[in-house]
Amino acid sequence: MALADAAGGNSRKGGEISGHRLHDHAGVHGHDDAAGERVRRIDSGALQSLKTRDNTTNIRHLLAVWGIIAATIAGAIAFELWLSSAGHSLWWLAPVIPLVVIVVGASQHQLGGAIHEGTHYTLFANRRLNELASDWLAAFPIYTTTYQFRIHHLAHHQFVNDPERDPDIAQLKESHHWLDFPIEHIDMVRALARQLWLPNLFRYTAIRAKYSALGFDKNPYRDEESRPSKWPTRMAVVFAVGVPIAAGVMSALGFGNASLAFIAAIFVVVVAYLAIAPAAAFPRTQLQPVISHRATIIGRVTFLGIVYATLTAIQTSTGQHAWTWYGVYWVLPLFTTFALFMVLRQWVQHGNADRGRFTNTRIFLVNPLVRYAVFPWGMDYHLPHHLYASVPHYNLKSLHTLLLGDTEYRGKGVIVEGYFGDDDQTTGRPTAMSVISGRHAPEGREAVHIDDTALELADVKDRAAIARESDASVRESRR
């Protein structure tokens, strides 16, 4: 439903309400020349105020997420220990484990939301604090880095829904999760049902990990002069994946001290290599890192080394199966429910949309549980976010209210209410499942929008190279 309809104006005849209003046939262009006028019309001072970041607000958001994670996992472990001490069957864990996997997977998606803020430099105002907190408190725990996500995500913003340059589209296609939009309700149900076959979710996570580690060949921010070595990535992957497998097996066989020595030895070898490797061995893009690639990858290995050593020490000293807990309560959600919630979000945020400034995504009004699991950290107000990505997540609702003063925003923006089911017969608003159907498909050819403001807070090496990508994207859209 268009925002103007929601506000009580511009209703369609006969009560028919479209999910899109795409009647701008002014031509395809790469830049919105009216943007400055639009900002003045909605009060540039108020907009600038909403862009204000600080170094405190997101502390409580991070504490809340980690509090839920800690309480959920600790509760499950405490319940298991009580069952064992009381002589009860561990089969009583059968209903508990799926619940933990759901809650932890949703919370891992919340950590993804924190990384998303860090990617836009909005997690904290201090640039180094933003990067370090995003990495150590969110990215490293789910096996990625803020920088690696940034080079994909800012490209997604600048070239949203460009089939050649939007990394989100490329990743979904490679993992076989891209849908041929528009799709009808029954096809969406079938697509959801296919995710119950867990290898599909494993593949999604594996492809995302590949993009994080190796990048995207067509990424518009690639540096053609960069010829990095594959060894830093190989060493990091060996430590991240190989060490826990070996250490877990050794600990399970009773070789706990040997396992600790093994972790320490591999850690020293990997960090020593990373410390002496030439700078040219590390990947470079057009986006300059806040913290050097060398320091970031060493930090990531250090974080994982602490986790792996702690698990081994707990298992060795207490006799409890700490590695099993880690596998079931952290790694399993990462490959299943976390992936599922990511897919549920990606399908509906940009699926069945075009490349217009106001029509490439939507606003989602959902209940708190769906918001926590599927639309974390302001991702429900996705249209305002794509318009002004430097506004922190906690100000996006206020930004939406401010933007309602823009007639084009009200006339073209789409409100989605609820996730499952069909259009609301009273309000005419589509659900997330129905907005990707044929009746809500774009009705015309909206002007292509290249969002150059996506890089306004980034330190860019060669803006001219990225400008050439922007021009090429516009030319290709005219074919």
Image: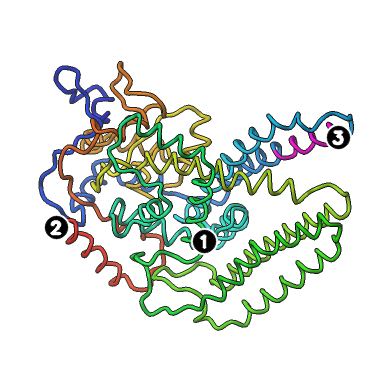
Q: Amino acid at mark 3?
A: Ser
Is disc 3 placed on a helix, strand or loop? helix
Observer-nearest residue: 287 or 191?
Answer: 191
Q: Amino acid at mark 2?
A: Arg
Q: Main secondary structure of the magenta part?
A: helix
Residue 302 x %, y %: 68, 65
Above or below, 55 relative to 417:
below
Q: Residues within 10 Å of mark 2 (few under 14, many from 20)?
A: few
Q: Which mark is residue 479?
A: 2
Residue matched to label 1:
127
Q: Residues within 10 Å of mark 3 (few under 14, many from 20)?
A: few
What residue is shown at x 25% (from left), y 31% (from top)? 19
What residue is shown at x 62% (from left), y 54% (from top)? 141
Question: Which is more foreground, mark 3 or mark 1?
Answer: 3
Residue matched to label 3:
84
Residue 122 x %, y %: 47, 52
Question: Which is more foreground, mark 1 or mark 2?
Answer: 2
Image quarter (top left, top right, bottom left or bottom right) of the C terminus: bottom left
Q: Earlier in the sequence, mark 2 or mark 3?
A: 3
What residue is shown at x 35% (from left), y 29% (from top)? 186
